Image (cartoon, rainbow, N blue to C red):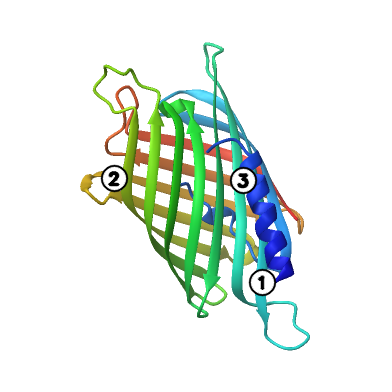
Amino acid sequence: MKGWTCGLALGVVLGIAAPAAAQVNTEKLRSWERPGLGGAVDLALTYRSGNVDLIQVVSAAQVRWARLEATTSTATKGRLLDLVYFVGSQDLGIQPSGRFKNAGFAHLRWTRMWHPRLGSELFVQAQYNEFILLKQRYVGGLGARLEVPLGKVGELALGTAYMLEFEDNAVPEDGPDQRQVLAHRWSSYLSLKAYLSDPAVSVVDTVYVQPRLTDFADYRVLNEAELSVAVTGALALVAGVYLRYDSQPVTGVRKLDVTMENKLRLTF
């Protein structure tokens, strides 16, 4: 219990200290290979097209605490019981005109596995994103998670949750868009992690779908795919393609964003 309290407190402190940050894909950094504290750091150089064409420098960090059920009295690894993790990111974009834009988010999530395959998830998140005219966004939610092991091939995870969302958009007061929006959403995801001949080479593909409960024509889709190649036990090269679709963006923001990213990931 003492370790659980310390891990959660650390996540909360980091979440407060990080830049105010939408529901984003945290599955790609989800890790619990060993119990206790750990994490990862990403550094990337990105090309983006869609709402803006630019070169983007991305940094991200994850801190996690895991509690596992040992398979024997001497085992150091067993099935997951609790996972508390914080993910934070800061993006700096440089446009051809020389103009700078930035975005950031912070996400804190607790997964509790009540059964080897079935668990619950509680999450909160904050975000800002100048690229899509988002001054601030706060979400919180509670849902269920189902894990389906695929043996040595990989693993499959499905999740569904109720999510309360508040947005403050950087739009004119006399324009057609609401500046502040409070919405109830249904957030679901499907995540597939596959090992390609060797666990050192893996692919993670995650799809999120988030319709508004009072208007299903208002929905968002996030699809992210990453290929990771381990260089050492702690360092990996990661290549990713990320698609974000918003059916009802504010005026001046395109519905589809595409990002291609190459980065280094250091795990500890």
**Residue 231, image x, y percentages:** 73, 53
- Can you say whether 248 is above or below 162 in the image? above
Question: Which residue is at a point 66% across and 75% down the rendered structure image?
Answer: 68
Question: Which residue is at a point 69% across and 63% down the rendered structure image?
Answer: 5
Q: Which of marks 3 and 1 is in front?
A: 3
Amino acid on which the number 1 mark rests in the picture: Arg
- Cα gap from disc 3 to disc 2, whole angstroms: 27 Å
Q: Within the image, what quadrant is residue 19 found in?
A: top right
User: Which part of the image, by quadrant, shows the C terminus?
Assistant: bottom right
Provide the secondary structure element on which disc 2 rests. Answer: strand
Q: Within the image, what quadrant is residue 6 found in?
A: bottom right
Question: Which residue is at a point 69% across and 60% down the rendered structure image?
Answer: 7
Provide the secondary structure element on which disc 1 rests. Answer: strand
Residue 180 at least partly seen: yes
Provide the secondary structure element on which disc 3 rests. Answer: helix
- Can you say whether 144 is above or below 116 in the image? above
To which residue does mark 2 refer?
219
Q: Earlier in the sequence, mark 3 or mark 1?
A: 3
The front one of 68 and 138 is: 138
The front one of 40 and 202 is: 40
Amino acid on which the number 3 mark rests in the picture: Gly
- Cα gap from disc 1 to disc 2, whole angstroms: 35 Å
Amino acid on which the number 2 mark rests in the picture: Tyr
Q: What number is the disc on residue 15?
A: 3
Residue 22 at least partly seen: no
To which residue does mark 1 refer?
67
- For label 1, the crowd category at 10 Å Cα-Cα, with few meaning under 14, some 14 to 19 and many 20 or more, is many
Taking the image as shown, residue 124 lies to the left or right of residue 254, namely: right
